[in-house]
Every structure is written in structure tokens, then in C-alpha cells.
Image: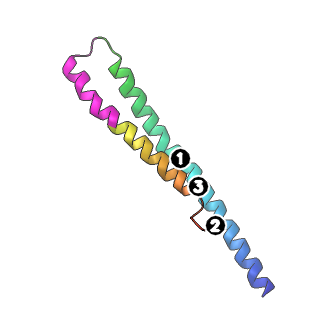
Amino acid sequence: LATALAALQARLAGQLAREQAFTRDASHELRTPLAVLRGGLDALAQRPDLPPAQRDALAPLQAAARLMAQVVDALLLLAREPAPGAA
């Protein structure tokens, strides 16, 4: 029984380490392209020579990028939080 419990504990520790590594990697892989996208859209919106029609077309793109960032943040927060009732 002790051997089985030790093996279970080792498996759980390994699974937790893999989940933490995945969350860390996913955070970087999801947030970095969004940051680049948002930065590019913001820089483009600041250009004084941008025609009004193109400036208007940027607003929904910027809103979508903000929403995507919020979704990624929420998913990563959920991945880090313990399930309700978990100890």
C-alpha cells in the first residue's frame, strides 16, 4: 500500500509540474503575438497620415485584439486556479 501511495504521489507531482510548465509556455506563446498585434495596431492608429477610412477600420481590430487578450488572461487564470472544492 505504501509503495502504491508513493507511486501515486510521484505521478501527481509529475502531472502538476507538466501542467505548470504548459501554463507558463502557453502564457508566453499566446500573449506575445497578441502584444505584437496590439502594438502594431496602436502604432498604426497614431500615424497622422492615416486616411480616415483606414483609421475607422482599425477600431474593430483593436477591440477584437483587446477581447482576445482578455480571453487569454481569463483562460490562463482558470488554468492556475484550483477547482472549486479542491484542497
Residue at the spot of label 2: 15
Q: Position of residue 31 (x, y in %)?
A: 49, 41
Check if residue 51 falls in the magenta segment: yes
Outermost residue toward the top in this view: 48
Q: Count neighbours of disc 1 (C-alpha within 10 A) and say few if under 14, some if 14 to 19, many if 20 or more.
A: some
Name which residue type carries label 1.
Answer: Ser
Callout 3: SS: helix
Give the camera-side residue of 8 and 59.
59
Point out the image quarter for the C terminus: bottom right
Choose top left, top right, bottom left or bottom right for residue 28: top right
Name which residue type carries label 2.
Answer: Gln
Spatial CA span between label 3 and label 1 = 11 Å
State which tag comes first along the sequence, 3 or 1.
1
Q: Which residues are magenta?
A: 49-63
Outermost residue toward the left in this view: 53
Outermost residue toward the front in this view: 85
Residue at the spot of label 1: 27
Point out the image quarter for the N terminus: bottom right
Residue at the spot of label 3: 80
Q: Please determine whether, in this image, residue 41 is positioned above or below residue 2.
A: above
Q: Position of residue 53 (x, y in %)?
A: 19, 22
State which tag comes first along the sequence, 3 or 2.
2
- Locate residue 76 relative to residue 12 in the image: left or right: left
Dominant SS type (magenta)? helix
Callout 2: SS: helix
